[in-house]
Amino acid sequence: MLVKNRDIRLFSQSVMKLVIATRNIGKLAEIKELLQGLDFEIKTLADYPEFGELPEDGTTFIENATKKAITVAKLTGHLTLADDSGLEVTVLGGAPGIKSARYAKNDVERNKKLLDALKLIPWEQRTARFVCAIAIVQPNGNIQTVQETCDGFIAFEPQGTNGFGFDPIFYYPPLGKTFAELSRTEKSKYSHRGKALRAARKILEQLITYTPS
Ligand code: ITT
C-alpha cells in the first residue's frame, strides 16, 4: 500500500498549536480565513476563558500587538499571533488611532461619533488610513512583527453591512465602495489586515515543526 509522507506524519507526530490572541470576532474571522491551510492546530481565546484583559497600554500598534502576543504566549506556552489595529483620520491628527476600540462603546456608536466629528469636513479632507500590526511570539520569547496600512476616505454616511468596526464608513476609492460592501475575501485582498497577514503567513510557514506524539 502506498503511504504518503504526510500520512506517516499524521500517525506519528502532533501538529504545533497556534493561538490567535484576539477577542474581536470580526478580526478573528479574517485571520482564520487567511491562515487557512497552514499546518497548525488553531486555538483562540475562547479556548482560554480564564484569561483576563490583555495589555494595550503601549504607544504604537506594534507595541500593543507585541504586548498582547507576549502575554498569551507566556500564559499558554504556545506560539501566539496578536493583531493591534485601528483607523487614523488625517484631520483628527491620526485619531482615533491606537485608541480605536475605545473611541465609543460599540461599532455603531464609534461610527456615529466619527461621522459627527467630520460633519463639516469636505470630501477631499476626509482622508484616513487603516493600520494593522501583527506580532508573532514563540514560546522561547522570539518576536516577529509586521505592519501594513490601507488608504481611503471617511464616507458621509454608513454604507454596507459586511465586515465590522469602521468598515461601513471606510470608503476605498479603487473599488468605489466601502469595506462593508465587500465580501470578506474581497476586503482581505486590499485591506491593512490582509496585507499584514500575507506577510505573517510567510513567517509562520518558517516556524512549522512537528513533535512526536
Ligand atoms: P483585540 O484587542 O481583542 O484583538 P480589539 O477590537 O480591542 O480586539 P484593537 O484594540 O486592535 O482590537 O482595536 C481595533 C479597532 O479598530 C476595532 O475595534 C475596530 O473598531 C477598528 N478596526 C481595526 N481593523 C478594522 C477593520 O478591518 N475594519 C473595521 N474596523 C477596524
Image (spheres, grey):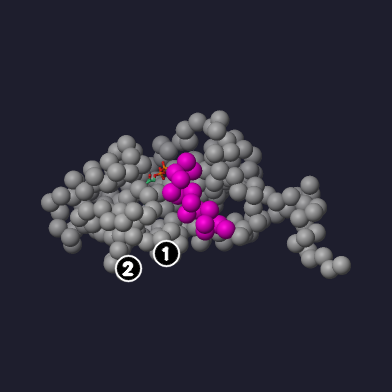
Residue 118 in the image: state x and y as whole percent.
18, 50
Describe residue 9's horizontal placement relative to residue 179 as left or right.
right
Q: Decide whether residue 68 is among the magenta residues.
A: no
Quarter of the image holding residue 39? bottom right
Q: Is residue 193 or residue 105 the one in the foreground? A: 105
Q: Position of residue 73 (x, y in %)?
A: 59, 41
Asked if residue 69 lies left or right of residue 131, the reply is right
Instruction: Say which element carries label 2.
Output: loop
The secondary structure that most of the magenta stretch takes on is helix
Q: State the mark number for residue 55.
A: none
Q: Residue at horizontal 64%, vertical 52%?
A: 40
Q: Is residue 68 visible?
A: yes
Which residue shows up at 44% across the image and 56% down it? 193
Question: Do residues under tags 2 and 1 come within 8 Å of each other at their CB atoms?
Answer: yes
**Mark found first going from the N terminus, 2 or 1:** 2
Q: Residue at x 73, y 53 (%)?
A: 210
Q: Which mark is residue 175?
A: 2
Secondary-structure class at tag 1 = helix
**Residue reaching furthest left?**
120
Nearest the eye: 16 or 139: 16
